[in-house]
Amino acid sequence: MNSITNNIFLIGLMGAGKSTVGKVLAKKLGRRFLDADHVIEERCGVKIPVIFEMEGEEGFRKREAQAIREVTNEKNIVLATGGGAVLLPENRKVLSEKGTVIYLHANPIELWHRTKSGEGRPLLLNGDAKKILENLYVIRDPLYREIADHVIETGKPSVNQLVNTLIMQLELST
């Protein structure tokens, strides 16, 4: 059934559903699911907000780049990246070269509704979360599109519908 051979990398803003979709997709494809943020937390022994607090965003991005470089060498994985992983050119290059990149797209208002508690999302804690998401979208959307092999709208479909659509697109493109 499965003619998909590449690693699959899910990108998109926080709240787009990368981890949720990634887990279901990996299960349906019989692959290992990895969440870049969880990989970093396991390596550091602390949660992402603590890393941001201690090292700032720049320190976190360095750790993220190292984790992405390493895990993208694995085979048959589904990886959910952090929303800001695309900010570093080296990450965009690695993701583009080592797998199929799926941009889970959602508009900033929808993302705000999904993330408004701000829990575990350090970038949303310093100001108006809706405005922050709108600003992040303006900066990151072109970067996501630059490396995306497929753009999937995450608005209305259920997770299973999204995953089935995604699998169909991946199979058609192999």
Image: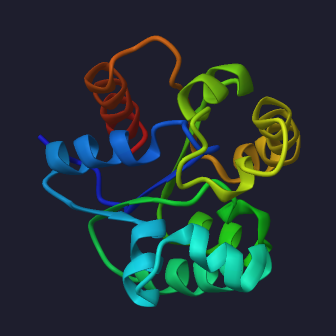
Left or right of 95 on screen, residue 10: left
Residue 72 in sight from this viewpoint: no
Q: Is residue 172 above or below residue 40?
A: above
Left or right of 140 on screen, residue 156: left
* Residue 2 locus on image (x, y percent): 17, 45
Q: Disc count in the image? A: 0
Q: Residue at x 32, y 26 (%)?
A: 159
Q: Quadrant of residue 84?
A: bottom right
Of the pair 50 and 96, the residue shown nearer to us: 50
The colour scheme applied to this rendered structure is rainbow
Left or right of 90 on screen, residue 128: right
* Residue 85 locus on image (x, y percent): 66, 64
Q: Residue at x 16, y 42 (%)?
A: 28
Q: Is residue 156 above or below residue 145?
A: above
Q: Residue at x 59, y 67 (%)?
A: 49
Of the pair 154 and 14, the residue shown nearer to us: 14
* Residue 155 locus on image (x, y percent): 53, 17
* Residue 118 locus on image (x, y percent): 61, 43
| Image quadrant occupied by the N terminus | top left
Q: Is residue 98 above or below residue 13?
A: below
Q: Residue at x 77, y 41 (%)?
A: 141
Residue 132 in sight from this viewpoint: yes
Q: Is residue 73 above or below residue 114?
A: below
